[in-house]
Amino acid sequence: MNSRRILAQAQFANSVGDGVYLVTSAFYFARIVGLPATEIGLGLTLGWAVGSVAGVPLGHLADRRGPRGVAVLLAIATAVAVASFMFVRSFAPFVLVACLYGTAQTGLSAARQALLAGLVEPAERTVTRAVLQATLNGGLGAGAALGGVALYLGTPSAYLTLFALDAVSFLVAAALLLRLPAVRPAPVAAAGPRLAVLRDRPYAAVTLINAVLLFYMPLLSVVVPLWIAERTAAPTWVVSALLLINTGSVLLFQVRMARRVKGLRGASSSVRQAGMVMLAACAVFALSAYGWAFLLVAAVLLVVGEMLLAAGAWEISFGLAPDDRQGQYQGFFGTGVAVARMLGPVALTTLVLGGGTIGWLLLGVIFLTAGATMAPAVRWSARSRESARSSASSLEAA
């Protein structure tokens, strides 16, 4: 219980910093650093692209060297990256720091998941992950409120103060992670191929399906605000209301939703239901062109789908990963988030704003199809793992 509490405290500390960053970074890079929007977008895309590639080897490092030490170092590296943004004044250094930031953040996520897997019993991992997700949302909300102060003041010193606070939040997280018990590294003999997850085609299929479903991520932050501005008569404050519905619902209900998921079969069912609910959300978003009250209903449906997906995906990602390779497997599974952040805004704005109602419905069908294909992919991966175990047992017996 103490380990879970410390994990939650560390999650809250750095998510406050993340909330500050999410709210203020674009304005800081544009107004204080003076970068054009195209360079900001390109630099951040490159940063997350590098981060998505680095997740697996950094996760593997966590397996081989111990996830606690690697997580601490990557939290410190993230703090260094955030602090470096304070001194960036041109495009080339901005890209370098963005790559360091994306790499450290992605690797930290993988190492922290490996740490959770090593400290928490398998039956409790999904619920613990739900607690951390709720904690994350609370921290993001607190950080966003602080970021709003900088946006109101609009001065360089206000922005720099909050970037410094963001950096400190990751140092605090590193100090908290040091208080956790060390998790024994995987033995060299048990580690097998250096990056075994890259050869695991069934797990890759599961990861790809999850990545498709994660394309819901930029909906509320990018796509829906543009849809509201171009296609509805809704007041601008509705955007804040939709985000409040999302974060508040996750805080209140994510843990309860996760407790319903037991085993891979239950997880697959949860993901299938997520696809169905996301289809309904997209259909209602399409109706918002005829009345903005539909936006509130759609936001509720979307967050239900999000929580169903999260609970199922956590159980699947841990349950299908070998215990001695949790770091690299979680690093690989986590690339879906980086892909959604990189490609989601462009792909979804093109589909939805270009296609209108048809675009929304097509997006919903994509979610529905991905959710339905998760169960057979999970069964394939589970059979593959069982076959690998049987082969290893036969070799040991021989």
Image (cartoon, rainbow, N blue to C red):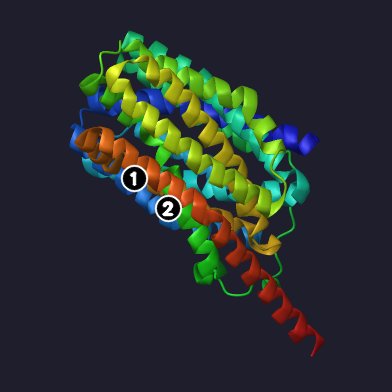
Q: Are marks 2 and 1 in contact (CB under 8 Å)?
A: yes
Label 1 belongs to which residue?
Answer: 342
Residue located at (33% from left, 15% from top): 292
Amino acid type of the residue tagged 2 in the rendering: Ser
The number of discs equals 2
**Labels 2 and 1: the sequence-earlier one:** 2
State whether residue 190 is above or below residue 287. Answer: below
Residue 65 in the image, given as x and y percentages of width and height: 64, 59
Which of pointers 2 and 1 indicates the residue nearer the eye?
Answer: 1
Residue located at (50% from left, 68% from top): 198
Residue 155 in the image, given as x and y percentages of width and height: 30, 13
Label 2, label 1: how many angstroms apart (C-alpha)? 10 Å
Amino acid type of the residue tagged 1 in the rendering: Met
Residue 317 in the image, given as x and y percentages of width and height: 60, 53
159 relative position to 106: left or right: left
User: Of 111 and 80, which appears nearest the observer?
Assistant: 111
Residue 145 in the image, given as x and y percentages of width and height: 47, 15
For the N terminus, the quadrant is top right
Residue located at (40% from left, 14% from top): 148
372 relative position to 53: left or right: right
- Residue 166 visible from this viewpoint: no
Label 2 belongs to which residue?
Answer: 52
- Residue 54 visible from this viewpoint: yes
